[in-house]
Image (cartoon, rainbow, N blue to C red):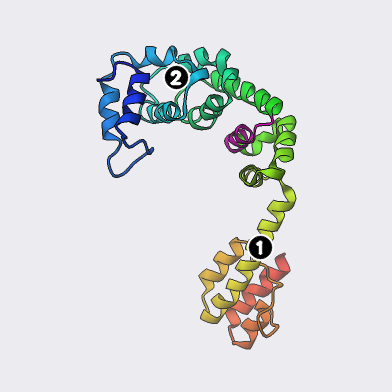
Amino acid sequence: MAIGFLDLAAEAKLDRWCMSPYCTTCQNMDFRTALAELPDLQHDLELLDLGILRRSQLNALRLVAILSSKSLDWTKILSIWLPHAGRNIRSTDYVCYYLLNGVTCSQEVRAAWISVCIQMAIEKRDDSLLESLVRRLGEDSRNHPKLVSAAIEQSVSSPLLRSALAKASLLPHEVSEQQRTKREKAGYNLFKAIRRNDVKAVQALWAKHANLSIVDEEGRTALELAVSLGRDGLAQLIRAKLLSG
């Protein structure tokens, strides 16, 4: 029987327990049962050395965070870990991505961790940590221009980092191209909706900013198609939409 967190992680690896977060098949029952039997999990985590944790131990820590997000004093745990964050960039990355937004802790401690992670990511130019920060901060990454600059620089060789930047609207040209593609797709779907005389579908496509200047295979705009098919109601709606911009 495991008597501490590291024993639990070792037992989970040895016996090949399911460690998939939010598993709907077994609900991580082996891990849950053993976790509940640990005498002092809070103390174990407070003494945990982030600098020496391996992947299997980090995976176990992630599952602990999910299963005990509110039952432990994570503010205290994260505060104790913080001075040692620089010893292992992979452990720091794991905490940044999986724990900071997943457990209950004070905003002050969370902000302190983010600050340390940003400094480390800029200094090390680590793709994974940069990606974790951009995904967690989202558009708020703009408040940290050196972080964004480092992320954009590293994204040249990292598709995942580039994707994170695009999702956070930090790559204007790429986002613009993505939006253009979506508007064109909605524009082509508009022709199908007009042929069905489906007013609700047309309005839904407008909400997606459908491109009304696109032409069909016969060179007709959406308005011209509606007129040719005798869809007077839709033609009137399209004219009004064009006039309103």
- Residue 216: x and y, percent? 66, 80
Q: Is residue 91 above or below residue 220?
A: above
The dominant secondary structure in magenta is: helix
- Residue 187: x and y, percent? 63, 70
For mark 2, give the secondary structure: helix
Query: In this view of the protein, can residue 170 be seen by the observer?
Result: no
Q: Is residue 123 above or below residue 241?
A: above
- Residue 232: x and y, percent? 60, 82
For this view, does 158 lie left or right of residue 46? right
The answer to which image quadrant residue 236 occupies is bottom right
For this view, does 157 lie left or right of residue 11? right
Q: Is residue 107 magenta?
A: no
Q: Amino acid at mark 2?
A: Trp
Q: Report which residue position mark 1 lands on.
A: 181
Q: Residue at x 70, y 31 (%)?
A: 147
- Marks 2/1: CA distance? 44 Å
Q: Bounds of the magenta span?
A: 125-136
Q: Residue at x 65, y 32 (%)?
A: 126
